[in-house]
Image (cartoon, rainbow, N blue to C red):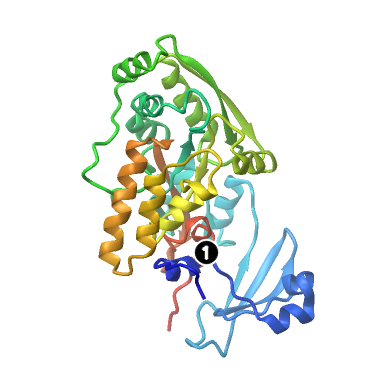
Amino acid sequence: ELEIPYAPILASWAYVYIVQKKAYEELGADGFGQTPVGTGPYRMVEWRKQEQIALEAYENHWNGVHAPGKIAIRPVSEAATRLAELQTGRADIILGVPIELAQTVEGDDALSLIVQKGIRPPYFVYNSKREPFTNPDVRRALNYAVDRELIVDALLEGYGEVRVGPFSPTEQAFNPDVEPYTYDPDKARAMLADAGLADGFEFDWLLRKDFQVKGEEVMQAIANMLGEVGVKANLNFAESSVWTPAYGDGDFDMSVNAWGKSAEADSVITGLRWVSDVSKYYSNPEVDATMQQARATFDAEERFAVYREADRLLREDAVALFVYAQSELYGTNKRYAWQPWAFGGNAGLLTYYVPKTS
């Protein structure tokens, strides 16, 4: 039973994993992890840690027996090795095709390159409770200092999407009436001067290692663009064990997070901590009130109209440096009519649908 109305509840359940209570209690956490009991179309038959997980189709699944009958999932960290596995037929689907290898996949008649356009945007969040980012004009100025098109076209070789806010223009929550940030370094300098920062400023940027496609290359390019308007960004690439508590505590000048596409805007805004009661680096009573209104609005069209108002507030308040969304690249054997799932936040990047075939 909910204490308050929560219209996005069905979409939020995409992140909930339901386990069998009896099996979990009998096996314990470790035992259940080794021999899980679920309701999906496949069951686990073998798990060799850091080597392979083997699955087979469950013959009594409510929607019939799925194909293929068996699936093996193997971790292969080296991208060139993953591609070789695909080319030789030892793998049928690979995740994380590097941009520099994309043309190799496309040029192979037996393979397909599947591109999910702009599916994962890095959000470069400001700590709006620390100077000089307490001033929204400073936050806005940096958004005018970055050439988004150059980053997507040159560094990502087109495998990305320009972003000027938390949502893609293809999403229902995107507000088309908000004036987008454009590349205008002169305007950025003028705004910084009006904010009393004509000589610029310096800040520390807490980033995550191996978090973005071409991460160091992209971040250095952004830092150089900020440098052109007098802002020095000290890039600090940290391991997740360092980044996670710092981000949760708001212990940064500027940081990064990411969220995939979602069926509801609520998970994007709250997941990135742009609602006051879950954030230690940003608060805005208008955003909070808008999200409360959306949660109490059960008509989908009306609710998305409210989300578009939240989008306007967040973009105009420049809660982050919005730059781009990177595409997710997969290589597949053409004999499989396979598509990745485009929704579900970060979980969606790791959840795949293998269609049932006759």
The percent coordinates of residue 274 (x first, y second) are 46, 46
Crowding near the residue tagged with mark 1, few <14, some 14–19, many ≥20 C-alpha atoms within 10 Å: few
Q: Is 21 left, or right, of 169 in this rendering?
A: right
Location of residue 229 with respect to 79 vertically, above or below? above
- Residue type at mark 1 is Thr
Task: Work out whether residue 116 or residue 106 is closer to the camera in this orientation and state it.
Answer: 116
The percent coordinates of residue 108 (x first, y second) are 43, 53
Q: What element carries label 1?
A: loop
Task: Return the residue found at the far bottom.
Answer: 60
Task: Work out whether residue 100 or residue 132 is closer to the camera in this orientation and state it.
Answer: 132
The percent coordinates of residue 119 (x first, y second) are 41, 51
Question: Splitting the image into 4 quarters, where does residue 225 fall?
Answer: top left
The percent coordinates of residue 45 (x first, y second) are 69, 77
The structure residue drawn at horizontal position 36% and vertical position 13%, both measured from the top left corner, is: 193
What residue would you read off at disc 1? 351
Q: Is 32 left, or right, of 7 in this rendering?
A: right
Task: Work out whether residue 303 or residue 257 is closer to the camera in this orientation and state it.
Answer: 303
Question: Splitting the image into 4 quarters, where does residue 197 fall?
Answer: top left
Task: Return the residue found at the far left.
Answer: 177
The structure residue drawn at horizontal position 58% and vertical position 52%, both measured from the top left corner, is: 82
Task: Return the residue found at the far top.
Answer: 199
Location of residue 289 with respect to 296 vertically, above or below? above
